[in-house]
Image: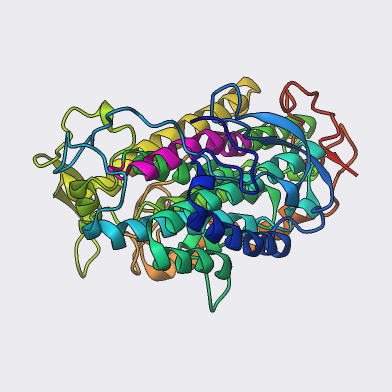
Amino acid sequence: MTAISNEKIPNNVNLSEDKKLQRALEQWQPSFLNWWNQMGPEGFQARDVYLRTAISTHVDGWAHYDFVKMPEYRWGIFLADAVPDRKIGFGDLLGQPVWQDVPGEHRNTLRRLIVTQGDTEPASVEQQRLLGQTCPSLYDLRNLFQVNVEEGRHLWAMVYLLHRFFGRDGREEAEGLLERRSGNQDKPRILGAFNEPIDDWLSFYMFTMFTDRDGKYQLLALAESGFDPLSRTTRFMLTEEAHHMFVGETGVQRVVQRTAELMKQDKNEDARAQGGIDLPTLQKYLNLWYSLSLDLFGSEVSTNAASFFAAGLKGRAKEEKFEDHLAMEGVYPMEVPAAGTGALEKQDVPLRNAMNEVLRDGYVEDCQRGVDRWNKVLADRGISFRLTLPSRRFHRQQGIFSNGLHFDPSGKPLSKDEWARRKDEWLPSAADRAYVKSLQAKAVVEPGKIQNWVAMPPKGVNAQAPEFEYVRA
Ligand SMILES: [Fe+2]
Ligand SMILES: [Fe+2]
């Protein structure tokens, strides 16, 4: 079951036994490659890149490293092993056997969940397609490409489900996933954060730290699904996703470290004077990507979330940690803006309606652990500034704190005018963005060298040295 076949489409789902499905996916494959060649990393498609590829889904086999040209990457369909006698772990169907096929009554909802997840995968490749041209180092360049090819594989993962279980509608959705474009006015990607530009490397690190981590929580919730093929697909995606968050968290950490070093070199502790990124600017980028990523969890109070949970479609992250899997009783106390005035009022939300917020709680804690590690770098170097996660109310475009309401990073309500006057204190201004980009104007592609604003990594990839030639000229 875990061996990955060496077919045109590598897979561990016995694709060759389902000729019709195999043909359909083989027809989609050239469209995917066409999309990759158009929208994938620009200027590097013919290069040899030191990449990780799955050769089996076993712990010891899925991380195989070799030099590959990206268009020849072995994108395929890999499911985690089936859990024998798996039962639905939450909601109204608690304890019933999981489904190997899509129940008719949940067909549209499941398709929507899969398409929404699937859409984020190619979107991020599109957002990051020009970054190679300004890379800080070959190590970073290779990590960018590893993330990109794996997002491509995640698209394959979702397209497999659409083709295999959703017939003609699924095939049409699979086409649509290659037709929308990040940031395009006429055919944008589905979710907001995936239409934002990622055109500098600080944004890339923040995106992989905060936005890929939203992905982790969505995948954890889908891994609980009663629709077993979705659960097995997302469980394997999670193993790949961990690397993306590593790139983000350690990327920001290397910036923090370098900023601290440059501050110590300057008589006024001015990182910018030494060609680095000052801590207040780092905080603004953090505020931006964290708040955009919070939006991806959906509204704090949601009847959709309640019905996904009731029906066994989408659970909580690590559902087994919870004692009560029905969530019929109990409330989630929330501060909710009152209609009209926007003044915050305490409200007890029935637990099932608060499932998005429960998922967001785990996410916020996980983000905080990363921020604590960054702050330790500052503390160890005797710098008193601390990075912080802004209030969940800050800069929201989805949910109960959006719709014309404004809050500062501490969560205090602001008038529209005050927000407009002060938002550049909290979010990257045009000048901040121009400054950050100016530090990355010239790509550094000499092995072992790096741009001035970010520190070298302490270790390389797969026991190679940091100065290894990860992308060959
Ligand atoms: Fe992904
Ligand atoms: Fe990712």
Q: Quadrant of the C terminus?
A: top right
Identify the residue at image location x=63%, y=55%: 125
Task: Give the colouring mode of the picture.
Answer: rainbow
Tell me if 398 is positioned left or right of 309 in this view. right
Which residue is at 38% across, 32% downward?
82
Q: Nearer the viewer, residue 136 or 143?
A: 143
Horizontal arrangement in the rendering, residue 446 relative to residue 19 (left or right): right
Q: Classify residue 316 by image quadrant.
A: top left
Q: Is any part of residue 365 visible from this angle?
A: yes
| Residue at point 52%, 38% (across, down) | 12
245 in magenta? yes
Question: Does 284 appear in magenta?
Answer: no
Residue 235: image location, x then y, percent:
44, 36
Residues in magenta? 225-248
Main secondary structure found in the magenta portion: helix
**Would you say 356 lies left or right of 197 here?**
left
